[in-house]
Image: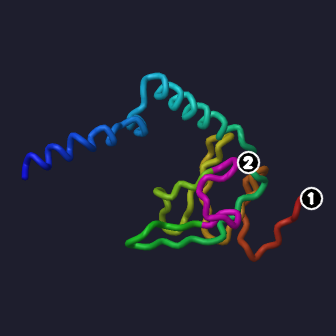
Amino acid sequence: MNIYLIILFLLFSPLATADGLQRLFTNAQERLELEANRNNSKTTAKAHKVPSYITVNGLIIRSNQATTVWVNNSSDIYQEGFMVKLNEIDNLTTPIFLSDSEQVISLKPGQTVNILDGKITDSFKKIPQLN
C-alpha cells in the first residue's frame, strides 16, 4: 500500500510546482519605494486647502464599538485640509486638527467654526453662504 502512495506521489509531483506563486515579502528596493510613497503622502496631505467653515454635524459615542463623528456631512475623519482626532474626544468635544497651520479646534455637535476669524457659532444661528 505504501509503495502505491509513493508511486502516485512521484507521478503527480511535477504538476505541483511553485511557478505561479508570488513572493510573500518585499525586497529592499520595494521597501524603499513604499517608504518614499508613504513620506510623499504625508507632505501632500498638508498641502490641501482648509475649508472656510467646519461643522460638527453629529457624534455617537458607544461603549463597546467605535465612535462615529460627522463633520461637514461626512463620517470620514480625514478630509481635505483637516482631520478629526477620534481618540481625543472628551465630554462631547471633538478636536479637529487643521493641516495647514497645525492648529487644533474643539467643537461640540451642532457648532460651526469660521476658519478665517476663528469664530464659533451654534447651528441655530444663520451662517452666511459664500459663492
Tag 1–tag 2 contact (CB < 8 Å): no
Residue shown at the point (53%, 67%) measured from the top left:
68
Q: Which mark sits nearer the N-terminus, 1 or 2?
A: 2
Q: Is residue 68 above or below residue 21?
A: below
Q: Quadrant of residue 56?
A: bottom right
For the record, the magenta segment spans 70-82
Which amino acid type is shown beneath numbered disc 1?
Answer: Asn
Where residue 15 sits in the image (x, y, percent)? Answer: 33, 42
Indicate whether residue 95 is drawn in magenta. no
Which color scheme is applied? rainbow
Q: Element under label 1?
A: loop
Which mark identifies residue 131?
1
Q: Nearer the viewer, residue 51 or 11?
A: 11
Residue shown at the point (45%, 66%) measured from the top left:
66
Indicate whether residue 75 is drawn in magenta. yes
Q: Nearer the viewer, residue 79 or 59?
A: 79
**Which residue, as the protein is rendered here, is positioned at the far bottom?**
124
Where residue 124 sits in the image (x, y, percent)? Answer: 75, 77
Which mark identifies residue 54?
none
Which amino acid type is shown beneath numbered disc 2?
Answer: Val
Where residue 12 sits in the image (x, y, percent)? Answer: 27, 44
Label 2 packing within 10 angstroms: few (<14), some (14-19), many (20+): some
Q: Nearer the viewer, residue 7 or 75?
A: 7
Give how far apart the Cα atoms at labels 1 and 2 are. Answer: 16 Å
Instruction: Specify the quadrant that holds the C terminus.
Output: bottom right
Where residue 25 sits in the image (x, y, percent)? Answer: 38, 34
Which residue is denoted by mark 2 in the rendering? Answer: 50
Q: Nearer the viewer, residue 99 or 21?
A: 21
